[in-house]
């Protein structure tokens, strides 16, 4: 029978299957960070348990660390959390990328870049954006701290198999439109609950044409669509990306693995529980105006009014969102002025994101009202960007150039958007207070964020780029 | 985990959609390494104003919501981050049961693992329940073994519940010790699948 990649990975990892119960799944890779792990290690200690397979665990520190002067953690509670992770990793024999490590970075950036994330693996982390790793054809999902403890102790998890949802994206992406715009447009069209109860497989010619970094941006935000996980069947693009990475298989082992990985892709004729479609040609650069990722529109649109929504509860939610965001219905998106720009997060902090943003700001200056920072996703990305001279472009334009970490994506470290300020952010969540109490977040792509930094307000990156080229000529 | 018994309690109504875990417990409280003491931070930015004073308008601060141990709320409750601090905060605040049309997946699981009963009911039923719950002294009885909630005044509704989790909650079992009973199977898997 024709199978989806989801069926194949699930079946291969089922350790115990009993009627009427969830399946016991084996976990191939367990990623850990400082925020969601301390209570899990404490739980092990209380019960005198050990870590079953420390070699399948991999830890980093990313959420609460400073990005300006990373060796000095002022916040004593954050400091203790970081030290607790060090202590736990030492005690249980788990590899840790600490602040001195050249491989340190955001957990969902370093897994792929170090070749730990591979097709067909089951990957978990106490972090909802674990879905990012699905871009490689892995089954990757976020778990809570109790589950972190369960995986540490048993290397398995009880899971009921979710339904399968195919999201087929076809057509050629327009100029200036990115992977970030695809996923924001998808969630705007179908709502934040579109994937609830499902694992999404993204298919279609648009997806096939994307690079691995673009695919990661899309899978990263499947959780914002409510899905358990999001993944993409692996292909040559995937294998090329993995080849030669630090912990990936090398030589003949790699060649053998590629043959295995090829067989993972969804069989033609496989049936999904549901299918949704999106036409890539219709997508514009997107900007969110509200307080969840579905509250977004194309850059040529205006802020909607509550009356445009059908249900009473949506109308109320939109009203609340507009009040929080300090926006009036009917305002053109390109008339919204901004105070901050954040280029970073596990959604958009990889080298291609930084290149795209640098291309926009090259030779220009950040608007005087705007404070702008670039936070590379990992120290590797940072070094590579510096080799290419991207840091100079950003710094000369007036951006701050930081060390890697989650930073202003959630503001657990000192990088916080002050109350009432408006931030163009390349991250994934625009919830109330996410970037700081009272902070107003607009989710956008890296080029859109860069263009906004220069203009002091949102601009259509498509015409902005053309104009930029024109100015360069004259 | 303690055993889940039938209980009668007071529902508080939070008539909002897509309530995310950043609201349930804002990130500034996630730096602690303990599991307890998060109740004081529950819905912090909604509950308190900038001066740290109680916001009288917020649903849980209203007189009829005092002492509530059941939360009745809108669809997609608990979306966003995987932080288990969210159910820890709810539990510590005193919430034993949450009733909503739908929940975000990770949050739903996190609740079960902390002995919070999460019940899904159709949206119309929730609307009705929200109306009723506004009456002062309103009480709701939650019976997991019969999978039924009722108010003794005509509201009586069955709910679906995963049989696996029902057994776990009713017995107060520790999931890890149950899994470790399958250690042979796990080891066999590791030996045959090339993990080792
Ligand atoms: S960058 Fe943001 S979304 Fe990604 S792991 Fe860090 S806090 Fe979570």
Image: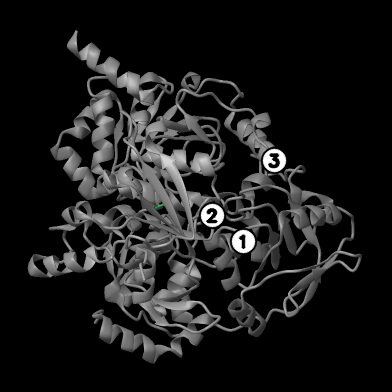
Look at the numbered disc 1 and give the secondary structure of its residue: helix
Tell me if residue A104 can be seen: no
Image label count:
3
Measuring from the top left, give residue A238's x and y in whole percent: 22, 54
Mark 3 Cβ and ligand 1 under 8 Å apart: no
Measuring from the top left, give residue B164's x and y in whole percent: 58, 79
Measuring from the top left, give residue B25's x and y in whole percent: 58, 54
Q: Is A191 above or below relative to A199?
A: above
Please name the residue that numbered disc 3 is placed on.
A311
Disc 3 to disc 1, how far (Cα)?
31 Å
Look at the numbered disc 3 and give the secondary structure of its residue: loop
Please name the residue that numbered disc 1 is placed on.
B89
Look at the image and tell me in which quarter the C terminus of chain B lies. Answer: bottom left
Look at the numbered disc 2 and give the secondary structure of its residue: helix
* Discs 3 and 1 carry the same chain letter: no
Please name the residue that numbered disc 2 is placed on.
B29
Disc 3 to disc 2, how far (Cα)?
34 Å
Mark 3 surroundings within 10 Å by alpha-carbon count, few (fewer than 14), some (14 through 19), many (20 or more): few
Which residue occupies 48% across, 49% down? A224
The answer to whether A68 appears left or right of A457 in the picture is left
Mark 1 surroundings within 10 Å by alpha-carbon count, few (fewer than 14), some (14 through 19), many (20 or more): many
The answer to whether B137 appears left or right of A315 in the picture is right
Q: Residue furthest right?
A: B153
- Chain letter of mark 1 equals B
């Amino acid at each position: 029978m024709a199978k989806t990649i989801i069926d194949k990975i699930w079946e291969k990892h089922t350790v115990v299957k009993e009627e009427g119960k969830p399946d016991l799944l084996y976990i191939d890779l367990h990623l850990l960070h400082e925020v969601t792990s301390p209570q899990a290690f404490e739980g092990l200690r209380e019960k005198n348990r050990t870590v079953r397979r420390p070699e399948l665990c991999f830890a980093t520190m990313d959420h609460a660390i400073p990005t300006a002067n990373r060796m000095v953690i002022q916040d004593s509670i954050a400091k203790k959390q970081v030290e607790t992770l060090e202590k736990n990793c030492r005690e249980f024999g788990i590899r840790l990328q600490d602040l001195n490590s050249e491989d340190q970075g955001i957990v969902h950036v370093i897994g792929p870049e170090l070749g730990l994330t591979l097709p067909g693996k089951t990957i978990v982390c106490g972090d909802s954006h674990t879905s990012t790793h699905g871009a490689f054809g892995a089954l990757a999902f976020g778990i809570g701290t109790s589950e972190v403890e369960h995986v540490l102790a048993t290397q398995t998890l009880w899971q009921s198999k979710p339904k399968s949802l195919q999201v087929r994206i076809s057509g050629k992406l327009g100029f200036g439109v990115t992977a970030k715009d695809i996923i924001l447009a998808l969630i705007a069209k179908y709502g934040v609950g579109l994937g609830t109860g499902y694992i999404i497989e993204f298919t279609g010619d648009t997806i096939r044409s994307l690079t691995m970094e673009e695919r990661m941006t899309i899978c990263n935000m499947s959780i914002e669509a409510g899905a358990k996980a999001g993944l993409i069947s692996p292909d040559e693009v995937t294998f090329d990306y993995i080849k030669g990475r630090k912990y990936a298989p090398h030589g003949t082992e790699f060649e053998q693995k590629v043959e295995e990985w090829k067989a993972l892709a969804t069989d033609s004729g496989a049936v999904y529980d549901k299918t949704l479609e999106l036409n890539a040609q219709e997508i514009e650069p997107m900007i969110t105006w509200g307080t969840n990722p579905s509250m977004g529109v194309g850059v040529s649109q205006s802020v909607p009014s509550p009356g445009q929504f059908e249900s009473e509860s949506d109308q109320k939610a939109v009203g609340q969102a507009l009040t929080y965001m300090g926006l009036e219905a009917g305002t053109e998106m390109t008339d919204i002025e901004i105070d901050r720009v954040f280029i970073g997060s596990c959604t958009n902090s990889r080298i291609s994101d930084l290149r795209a943003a640098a291309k926009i700001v090259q030779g220009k200056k950040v608007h005087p009202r705007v404070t702008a920072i670039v936070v590379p996703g990992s120290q590797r990305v940072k070094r590579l960007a510096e080799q290419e001279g991207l840091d100079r472009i950003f710094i000369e334009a007036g951006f701050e150039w930081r060390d890697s970490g989650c930073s202003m994506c959630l503001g657990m470290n000192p990088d916080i958007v002050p109350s009432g300020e408006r931030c163009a952010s390349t991250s994934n969540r625009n919830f109330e207070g996410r970037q700081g109490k009272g902070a107003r977040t607009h989710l956008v792509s890296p080029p859109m964020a860069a263009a906004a930094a220069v203009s002091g307000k949102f601009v259509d990156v498509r015409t902005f780029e053309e104009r930029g080229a024109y100015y360069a000529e004259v | 985990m303690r055993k889940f018994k039938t209980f009668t309690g007071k529902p508080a109504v939070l008539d909002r959609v897509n309530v995310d875990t950043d609201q349930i417990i804002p990130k500034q409280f996630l730096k602690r390494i303990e599991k307890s003491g998060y109740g004081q931070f529950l819905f912090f930015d909604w509950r308190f104003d900038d001066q740290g004073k109680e916001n009288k308008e917020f649903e849980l601060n209203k007189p009829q919501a005092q002492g509530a141990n059941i939360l009745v709320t809108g669809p997609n409750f608990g979306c966003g981050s995987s932080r288990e601090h969210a159910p820890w905060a709810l539990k510590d605040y005193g919430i034993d049961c949450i009733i909503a049309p739908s929940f975000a997946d990770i949050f739903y699981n996190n609740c079960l693992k902390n002995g919070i009963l999460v019940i899904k009911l159709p949206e119309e039923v929730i609307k009705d329940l929200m109306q009723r719950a506004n009456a002062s002294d309103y009480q709701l009885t939650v019976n997991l073994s019969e999978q039924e909630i009722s108010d003794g005044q005509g509201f009586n509704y069955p709910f679906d519940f995963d049989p696996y989790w029902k057994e776990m909650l009713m017995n107060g079992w520790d999931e890890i010790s149950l899994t470790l009973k399958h250690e042979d199977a796990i080891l066999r898997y590791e030996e045959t699948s090339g993990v080792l």
